[in-house]
Amino acid sequence: MNSDKLAHHLHLRARDVGRYALLPSNPDQVASIAALLDEPEFVARNREFETWRGTAGGETVVVTSTGVGGPSTALAVEELAALGVDTMIRVGVSGSMQPGTANGELAVLTGAIRDEGTTRQYLPVEFPAIADIDVVLALREAADRAGVPYRCGPAHTKDSYYGETEPDRMPLAASLTERFEAWRRGGAICSEMETAAMLIVGTVLNVRTGSVVMMWSQDAIDTGTAPSTDPLLATAVDAMRRIIAT
Ligand SMILES: O=P(O)(O)O[C@H]1O[C@H](CO)[C@@H](O)[C@H]1O
Ligand SMILES: O=c1cc[nH]c(=O)[nH]1
């Protein structure tokens, strides 16, 4: 993209970014992630897309919020890729799906179940949403270094938060419950709303994408006891530093 052209949704120009991006969905997390980089500074805000910038190993790293769900995540990945970003990591929070998952455990995602609509407008649903292997390995090493409990595996990505968390009140209750149980028995480790779009749009645009989330069970949400996201943010930034260094 011409360096003077303003990206339609992100309100960024090519000269604002480098090759690397960290993508939380929540605009409120952007400044805290940027604070873990060197020389953090605010860059732009439009709609749900807030961007800060910092450096790591001398390279520019942008932190841009995607908003909730596939459509806005696809916009962010598309526009960042058009501006020249070639490596992107989602950083977020999810529900846990496997018994024995500790509250606050991280999920280093190797892929995602495409139980959403956005990516069907990119590739047929039979095409798997798979994370870039270098990003997965960097995230796993970073989680090891942080000493935080984590597991690796696929996410379940959906469009309806309440369809997942309160299926019984939906007209499609039986189908939602049966399908969720199938994802769980198949080994999905967490449920969230952005990773499939990150991975499939990244695949189509030939950019490296990966995702790390902190798992927080529904029961814990009910009691309001939120684990700290510090180990999550540290792991994502450390992984990006490692990717840049290698
Ligand atoms: O914590 P974030 O990254 O927003 O992730 C999860 O939380 C939101 C739903 O509450 C969805 O965006 C879901 O993916
Ligand atoms: O999408 C989400 C996010 C957090 N917790 C969930 O159960 N689902």
Image: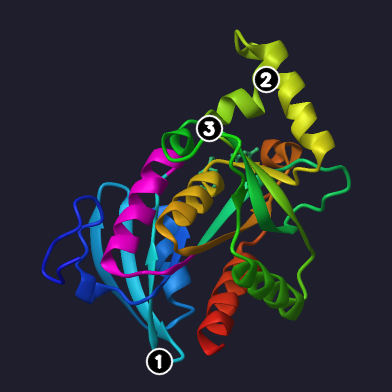
Mark number displayed over residue 116? 3
- Residue 154 versus residue 61: which sits nearer the camera? 154
In the image, residue 231 above or below residue 73: below
Image position of 40 (left or right of 37)? left
Would you identify the image quadrant in which residue 10 lies? bottom left
Any magenta on residue 73? yes
10 Å neighbourhood of mark 2: few (<14), some, or many (≥20)? some
- Counting from the top left corner in percent of width and height, residue 150 is at 77, 62
Residue at (67, 20) in percent of width and height: 176
User: Reading the chain from its start, which is encountered first: label 2 or label 3?
Assistant: 3
Which residue type does callout 1 highlight?
Gly
Image position of 228 (left or right of 152)? left
Of discs 3 and 1, which sits in the foreground? 3
- Counting from the top left corner in percent of width and height, residue 241 is at 54, 83
Give the magenta-colored segment's residue range. 68-88
- Residue 126 versus residue 71: which sits nearer the camera? 126
Mark number displayed over residue 58? 1
Which residue type does callout 2 highlight?
Leu
Q: Read off the residue under disc 2.
A: 176
In the image, residue 149 above or below residue 55: above
Picture quarter with the C terminus = bottom right
